[in-house]
Amino acid sequence: AQTVTQSQPEMSVQEAETVTLSCTYDTSESDYYLFWYKQPPSRQMILVIRQEAYKQQNATENRFSVNFQKAAKSFSLKISDSQLGDAAMYFCAYRWGDKIIFGKGTRLHILP
Amino acid sequence: DSGVTQTPKHLITATGQRVTLRCSPRSGDLSVYWYQQSLDQGLQFLIQYYNGEERAKGNILERFSAQQFPDLHSELNLSSLELGDSALYFCASSPGLATHTDTQYFGPGTRLTVL
């Protein structure tokens, strides 16, 4: 069965610094999608970045980038130049066909 | 703002009651998904509709049901409510059939409290 694991329940980073959130997953499929979602205190789920498993190039969206290691089944999120508005819960998600599975999340604190 | 709207924002009710949560997808999106987020279970996929038809089922209880109407809005019905049903219920929408390329956009959620 597919699983998604976020091993860091909480993390803190100084404002303007860089932080990396970890995510590992388990699947026997070869064609799937991976996502990072952000859930700020407003509780809305916001798509941060998406990675197609067939693409070797790591996805990037402004200050957000991923390190996708398909063989290792690892999908970490790097946030550069951290800002106070980045404080939120971050969820890693795996999608294959109709199935979507979320990790339990990492709470990110930004220290001013 | 994702473009997905959900009503109501908050709902407080008693055990044994029935409630209906409403979701309007982004303009042009045909797929609607429902999720439950509770403290101990994390984010769980409940059910998906595509253009009015049920497309996929996740961990949805028999006491729960959903439908998608011709105007593409969706409703999630929760009946015989129990204390454990207290959670945040999210709706998400995506452009088309649940293919690998679809990205889901989440609404702000409905907070359900069962007393």
Image: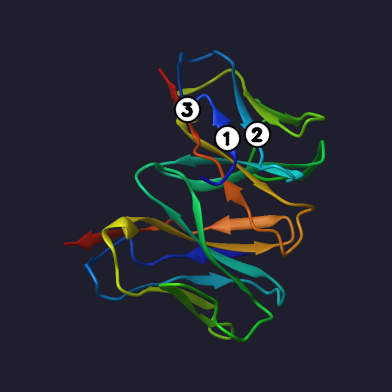
Residue at mark 1: B5
Question: Disc 2 is attached to a residue of which chain?
Answer: B
Query: Which residue carries the number 2 mark?
Result: B24
- Using the image, name the chain to which the residue with label 1 belongs: B
**Residue name at image x 50 percent, y 29 percent:** B85
Count of numbered circles in the view: 3
Residue B9 badge: 3
Q: Residues within 10 Å of mark 2 (few under 14, many from 20)?
A: many
Give percent across and percent down for residue B106. 56, 46
Residue at mark 1 shares a chain with residue at mark 3: yes
Display colour scheme: rainbow
Quarter-of-image position of residue B86: top left
Q: CA distance from mark 3 to mark 2?
A: 13 Å
- Image quarter for residue B77? top right
The chain to which mark 3 is attached is B
Please say if the residues under marks 1 and 2 sit with CB atoms less than 8 Å apart: yes
Residue A73 is situated, as x and y percent measured from the top left of the image, at 55, 78
Residue at 42% x, 65% y: name it: A6
Three-letter residue code for mark 1: Thr
B87 and B28: which one is in front?
A: B28
Residue kind at label 2, given as amino acid type: Ser
Disc 3 element: loop
Describe residue B63's horizontal placement relative to residue A7 as left or right. Answer: right
